[in-house]
Image: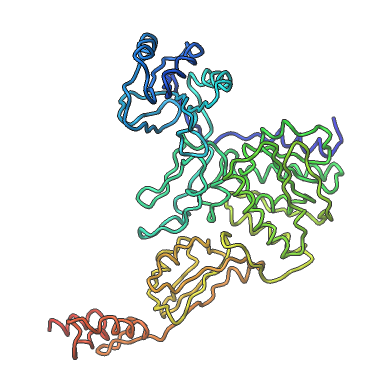
Amino acid sequence: MTNNPVELAQQVFEEFSVEAASYVSFESEGKLLIIGSATRVLEVLPLLKVFSVSVLCDGRSSSQEQARLSAVVSLIEAVVEIQWSGYLGAFTVVGITTPFDLILDLRPERSCQSALSPIGYFHVNELKELPSVVESLNDLIGVFDKPKYFSYLKEKCAHSRNKIEGCRQCIDICSADAITSVNYEIVVNPYLCQGCGDCSVVCPSGAMNYQYPTRQEILNRLRSMLKAFFLAGGVRPIVLFCSIEDQSVLHSDLHEYLVYPLESLTAVGSEVWLSALAFGASQVVLYNAVPLLPSSEQTLNEALKVTHMILKGMGFSETVLYRSEGINVQETKTELLTFLPATFAGDNDKRTVFRLAVDHLYQNGSQQPNQVDLLANAAWGEVKVAGDLCTLCFSCVSSCPSGALQSGQSSPQLNFIESLCLQCNQCVSTCPEQAIELNARYIYKGIDARSSRRLHEEPVFHCIDCQKPFATEKMIVIMKEKLSGHPMFQGDAVKRLEMCEECRIKSQFG
């Protein structure tokens, strides 16, 4: 039995079993659609004898070529514009009733609009690539299960309210085009999702989560690793996050690193990186040898910028959390962190974990400011209201998905709890007076962030007949200005605007 702290920590990692919460099933019988010129199709057919092949010729073909193809495959008549959609076992082409299991695209340009092709679609531009593609095609005949990588909590989502769109970060970042908005609701196609995790990292509310493994499982496993390391006498551990694919190229002489392989490097975000530091890691490395998807590269870099701003605000060097690319792990010299590890348990709530981690780091930081400014795309910040424009119509309150904006119980007030604000832009999009703007920042002191503060207040206007409070003075002034030319409110009739609903009806109809 080993006494090496790193080896013991890795042993704990291996013993911590994780099961997929649910699976997505694909079924493929080998019905292959080839799209391309007749000449190229005839060149590749000898390698595809195990498939049931249909051919959709792109461009002109000679009668001799058509005759040769018709003798061995199902030749489909050309369609005006080739448009396809779907995934392994369920591909469809516009204008063709027959479904297909697989698509081999031999045209010069890749026809898939998504940055990440759906499982079962292959584009071959050069014939030298064909043998490896055919091998992959052969592996995709049968019944397959893959983990359902995501979980989506509709009740937490900040995408839309009242048919007005707010946050759409998961839609914009998805490389597989698996996330769409249908009738102002987020819909995720589990057959297109390939588990890159970008959506989970950019989601401000934690509505979209990576679930293989879950955030809670990742955190508990991480804490167990570090605990085992310290119990074995280890000091100053360095945690290295990487993908399972990249783990295979890591050099074996990296004794000092606690390697945490993931399905994807962007399966975890800043709340996990910061938790690693809070749990006792002296440094955290985000490592990739294989180039990331452009969306994952963007996601990772933007999350790092925001996290570095928060760390720097507490007096920590950016080098306690850094990226390393290439075959060799690039070492960065820094003053390694040393303080008592945090003891909070893993949790699936993204924002709760983030704040718990930052709270612990804040207590051990060399600087303890009240707040730090962040980039505009951050998930933390405040709402600013222009008092001269706001009428306290409370459209923003009804549209706020997190309850950060609240009305006064019995008086015309707009109140705000900053810790709940997602910076989702829903209130900005909803406000009819364009009186709201967002300011990305992070308040370190939890009591300040959780406290309700008043953004705007107006004097109450009372009905001129029954004295019932029913609006604000500013709202009445604005209504009178906007309706000054309306035929229903001329002369004494304008006074009806100063009446509550009941008194207005009595005045108008007797």
**How many marks are shown on the rendered structure?**
0
In the visual, does 353 lie left or right of 259? Answer: left
Residue drawn 38% across the image and 52% down it: 184
Q: Nearer the viewer, residue 105 or 84?
A: 105
Relative image position of residue 92 (x, y in whole percent): 37, 29
Relative image position of residue 159 (x, y in whole percent): 44, 55
Quarter of the image with the C terminus is: bottom left
In the visual, does 142 lie left or right of 92? Answer: right
Compared to residue 380, the image places residue 64 above or below, namely above
Residue drawn 56% across the image and 59% down it: 377
Compared to residue 258, the image places residue 507 above or below, namely below
Relative image position of residue 191 (x, y in whole percent): 46, 34
Compared to residue 186, the image places residue 23 above or below, namely above
In the visual, does 258 lie left or right of 371? Answer: right
Relative image position of residue 229 (x, y in whole percent): 81, 42
Name the quadrant containing residue 18.
top right
Residue drawn 53% across the image and 36% down it: 194
Quarter of the image with the N terminus is: top right
Residue that lies at the very extreme toward the left in this rendered image: 510
Image color mode: rainbow
Compared to residue 118, the image places residue 62 above or below, namely above
Residue drawn 73% across the image and 62% down it: 312
Name the quadrant containing residue 204.
bottom right
